[in-house]
Image (cartoon, helix red, strand yellow):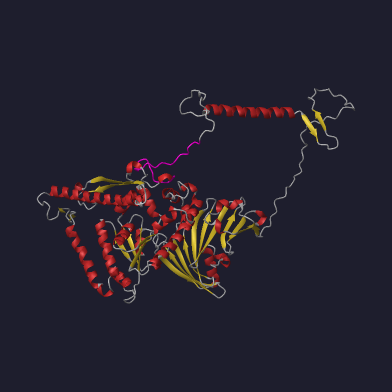
Amino acid sequence: MAANLSEAAGNQPDAGTVKTIFIGITGTRGAGKSQVGNILRSKDVPVIDADGIGHEFLNGPNEVYYAVLERFGADLVDVEGGPINREKLGAIVFSDEQALCDLEALIHEPIFNLIEKRMAEHAGKPVVAVELPLLHEKGRKAQFDVVWCVVADEAVLIPRLMSRDDVSEQEARDLMAKHATQEEKAAQSDVVIDNSGTPEELEAKVLELLAALTAPVEADAEPEAEAEAEPEAEPEADTDPVVDGEGDTETPAEGDADSEGDSEEDSAEAHYQKRLRQFAEMSTEAVLGKMGKVATTGHKSARATTRMNVSSCEGDCSDGEHDQERELEVTVSMAVRNAQVGGGEPCACGCGENCRVGCACASDCGCACKKPEPQPGPNPNPNPNPRPKPDVEEGKKGFDRTTLIVAAAAVLIAFFALLAFLYAMNSPKVTVNNPANPVVVVQQPVCPVNCDKPVKQDEPPVFRLEPPAHDDTVVVVPALPCQPGVFRELTEEPGYAFRAIHNAVRPRIAKYYERYGDGCKGLLLVGRDANKRLVIHQYYDANKWLEYGLVFEYFPNRTIQVDRFDGRDNIFTGRTVYMVDQNDRIVGASVYDGMRRLVLETTITVGASGEPLSVSITRYDANTRVVLGSDSISEASKAVTYLNTNLLGYDLRSSLQVR
């Protein structure tokens, strides 16, 4: 570990110039990345927090802020222009994989761009750190000189997550499962920091790493020796009991060696107190995270509880009779309120006479500021002797609910009565459509048998309504015009595609084209951007329900991301990321499954025309990213067949271009 740090430090230029060493800090949820960042800040190291930048985008109006509200709904804010409620947003995206994908598409790129900008602003400082939870998942390791991964034992990590995020144990495990495991992150990092102990132990580790990182190259040997010697001395100061191979408990030197029972009781007491202190520190960190910036608020409170069943010997007991489990619980509550100033006037929360919705003036925050209410204007014609109002039950205004229901029922009955009246008036009359001589004839009642009589010449003919004669002729109604196999440009987005195109994708589409299949059954919908690049490529069935579709996104680093969505529910099922050279030829690709886990990588050798000549293939285990095997295809026709089969949208490569 020290060798890696010394190597990173040794990359600095000669004296007189300062090369900034950029540290990437990553780790799973609740591991303690922020704790490491705070320790570095205490030593005047600039620390850029990716989560904090994300909060900046969500706390007030900006391009990302409005895009999130458009995708997930304006009800995420309590007042117009106010901060987005991250708890509501989290409840949406963590229960809907597509929603999480949409949020990442909206916010990740702006976050990374701002991180790069702030890293450039700090260039020239000896060390700059960046807290980036998804550092490896987003392929950002190359931006840093050294990557630190913070890990913790699950016995500490799960309670810490439960306390900080106020979730159950299963919810905490589900949150951790959404990203790479600690083992995967650690395997790709340069340094692994174990944060299973106390804050003091973590601080000592971080400062040791920082000293090794900033020390001159020729002084590396001494810090390494000291770093190796220090851990040996730590157990001497530890007051926890040590269990030997026979199952007996050895207490510290100052303990009472004469009484084994007292020693075990003292050891368990010390063990429980140590765990309670750890829980208190975890709860405190969780509450401080919920409080946020307390210097700029007028009223805020937060509370966190850590609860866990703890064994007296944490599984080290060789004799089950001495093992005792207790439920430990620590609750930490914090509040910040404005102090009373001059009996409440002027308003301590800073609202003054312009108190408005969103101003931090809660009833118990120590200020008298209230939202002003409109005052009634003067009455131009005051009545000195107003008529007394009838006595009404207090709290009731206008009609009660029963009166309104009765009135509505009466109106409905009157309406149906009117319809019945109009029907009765019109039913006995038949209008003969004869523009030359319109005749209205009253139908006579059906006469009994043998009542026929000749019709007088001066009487108008009577037309009786008879059912039409049975006709076996089939009338074919022509279908809407359709030209199978021909692309037709549309003037706007078709209605059937509304449910299948994501809100984050829709603004990128400038033109829509559709092509029907044989017999006008099923169709293909294509969307292109202003540069005529392919954005969507969707197939619909005969009822115009989505069968599957591809979404294309183009990035400045000359990569093209292709996502596949299947079925009526528009479920994400896979992704291919293409690498494109300066001539817009695809020279490599990575394939991910529906859980965004890497399963395949290819390197493509192409000819002058851009067509593949051969392909090299590496397959990975989706869970561990361990290489399962490698292969190559040197025959061009077989290479094309393999790529068309295993890469999303490769058969559309002639339509793909970065520019």
The answer to whether residue 121 is above or below residue 463 is below
Q: Nearer the viewer, residue 388 or 406?
A: 388
Quadrant of the rendering where the C terminus is positioned: bottom right
Q: Nearer the viewer, residue 497 or 203?
A: 203
Q: Which residues are magenta?
A: 354-377
* Drawn side of residue 616 relative to residue 511, left or right: left
Q: Nearer the viewer, residue 621 or 302?
A: 302
Magenta residue check for 358: yes
Q: Nearer the viewer, residue 629 or 434?
A: 434
Magenta residue check for 195: no
> What predominant SS class does the magenta segment belong to?
loop
Q: Give residue 111's position: percent from left, percent from top.
A: 43, 60
The quarter of the displayed image where residue 357 is located: top left
Residue 355 seen anywhere in this rendered image of the structure: no
The answer to whether residue 583 is above or below residue 464 is below
* Drawn side of residue 474 relative to residue 99, left or right: right
